[in-house]
Amino acid sequence: MSDTKNWIKALDTTKVARGDVARWDHDGRSYAIFRTDSDAFYATDDICTHEYAHISDGYVEGTTIECPRHAGCFDFRTGQALNPPVCVNLRTFPVKVEDGAIYIDIA
Amino acid sequence: MSERIVIIGAGQSGGRVAQILASNADTNMSITLIGSEPHRPYNRPPLSKGVLLGKSGLDDCLVWPQDGSVESRVMFHAGRRAKSFDARQQSVELDNGTVLEYDKLVLATGSRVRHLSVPGAGAEGVYTLRTFDDAERIARQFRTGKRLLVVGGGFVGLEIAAAARARGLETVVVEATHRLLSRIVPEEVGAALARYHEEAGVSFRVGSMVEELVTTSSRKPNAAVLSNGETLPYDLAVVGVGVTADTALAKAAGLDVQVGIRADSSLRTSAPNVFACGDAVSFWHPVFERHVRVEAWHNAEDHARVVADQLLGRPAVCNTVPFFWSDQYDRSMQIVGIPHFGSELVSCTLNDAKILYHLDAYGVLVAATALGHDRVIGRKISEARRLIMRKVKPDPHLMKQGRSLL
Ligand SMILES: Cc1cc2nc3c(=O)[nH]c(=O)nc-3n(C[C@H](O)[C@H](O)[C@H](O)COP(=O)(O)OP(=O)(O)OC[C@H]3O[C@@H](n4cnc5c(N)ncnc54)[C@H](O)[C@@H]3O)c2cc1C
Ligand code: FES
């Protein structure tokens, strides 16, 4: 199957610890790249949908990221807003890992 | 037969209870919401920030989604005050004489602002900030006013001062105690906060009280006379000397009231079928094993969820660790837990941020207070919340060094 996605190389996998998140800035935008304890990778917009904060500065627990400013939470796999004050979902992006690097389709 | 739910108080907490019921209850439940303000339920935190700056309007603050889904399901009496309720008859009387019977009642009456009791306190140009209408009035005065006097160096007072500076007003904060937020945050944090405000051009008079607000012969604002003898000219004054739980209705109905409306950890009051939520409640907190009353946005949310769950037939208790935030310029001030349950402080400095851990006599973490950029303090506060929940005794050395505690 041909790959129609527009993959852009983001970070080396070593830049994101297990159970953690890292910020990646590209073309004037910030992305949050997550790595679960079981080594699955996910990417979302890095700016909270409530007011303004980089969610990559927040606290990761399981598959949840808690915003560092007002403690709103998102499921980073789906971007779903889980509790107020956040009520708008985060945008998510397809991710793949190849040769130790994380690629994101930011189209 | 249908179940009749009546909610008194259409602020954040009461509004959220109504919303959760509206989207989850079956059609047998009738939901009535009574609010003395003319507006749909709204969030108050933006009042002292975006609304004063003229950046946010009522629509930006509303609790309910704008699609009308809640309104279509809830009988909302806006601009109506509940005058009294009878816990035995299970009925509520409104200020227009209407009597509503209930099967379950929710008291969400919130807080009431304290006023100054000095000569001139009721004069023109003296405001308090609790409601959206208050905020709009003050925002309007910000456009023409030049000299603002803020009475009270608490969170709301400081946020008003920050907004006023951003709009170019000369701003003086008068605080009766010897430092800012003396009852709420440790001295180090109060001092750091004062520095941010001074850098933004706010001046302070601490340890002084306003003794009189003097008006001109045409009753226009003129000057404040302080206990230190100073006379401060002003043309706009905002009084932020705190709030008290609005318990009048509950008291008159014979409910147990102490500081707030007394409730158990499921937010059931001393009267059958009467719940209470939000600022007005003093509830039994299972983690701290004491009654706590919290004036904070997250608390009002947590309470609303616990009450709504039970009205929907699902048992629930409120065991979340209280969390408060205040945005101060580009920094954030965050408090998790109940600082005054602590008797010992461990302080940690990370870059220019401060995190203070509050421990009780046994070394159990009961609260953390932080001031700094959310980049630095956010994770520490999230971590502290989990530790407090588990009643952990963290290693003071690790706390001091800002190392991971989990
Ligand atoms: C200016 C300001 C800034 C704030 N900023 C922050 C912040 O940054 N962070 C934070 O965590 N918290 C903040 N708070 C606190 C937060 O807004 C409150 O904790 C929250 O509003 C409590 O919700 P509540 O529903 O219990 O009470 P409220 O929102 O006060 O609602 C109670 C409502 O009940 C109505 N009512 C009372 N009695 C009756 C009656 N008899 N009949 C009918 N209606 C009645 C009142 O008119 C009111 O509308 C702020 C508060 C203010 C005022
Ligand atoms: S900015 Fe993220 S919850 Fe408010």
Image (cartoon, grey):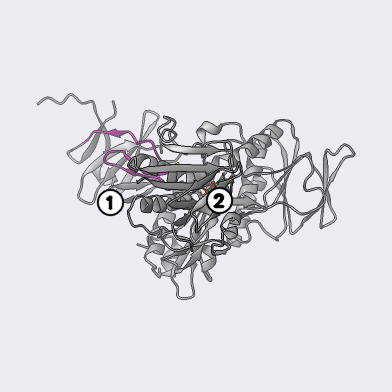
Left or right: A54 as drawn, with respect to B36: left
The residue nearer to you, when weighing B393 against B72, is B72
Residue most extreme to the left: A1
Magenta segment, prevailing SS (helix, strand or loop): loop
Residue most extreme to the bottom: B362
What chain does badge 2 belong to?
B
Instruction: Identify residue for label 1.
Output: A62
The C terminus of chain B - image quarter = bottom left
Q: Nearer the viewer, mark 2 or mark 1?
A: 2
Q: What's the residue type where badge 2 is placed? A: Gly
Alpha carbon distance from label 2 to label 1: 35 Å
Number of numbered callouts drawn: 2
Tags 2 and 1 touching, CB below 8 Å: no
Region of the chain picked out in magenta, as a range? A67-95
Secondary structure, mark 2, is loop
Whether residue B326 is visible to the viewer of this picture, yes or no, is no
Q: What's the residue type where badge 1 is placed? A: Gly
Mark 2 vs ligand 1: CB below 8 Å = yes
What chain does badge 1 belong to?
A
The structure residue drawn at horizontal position 20% and vertical position 41%, both measured from the top left corner, is A100
The structure residue drawn at horizontal position 74% and vertical position 31%, both measured from the top left corner, is B144
Q: Which mark is residue B110?
A: 2
Left or right: A101 as drawn, with respect to B114: left
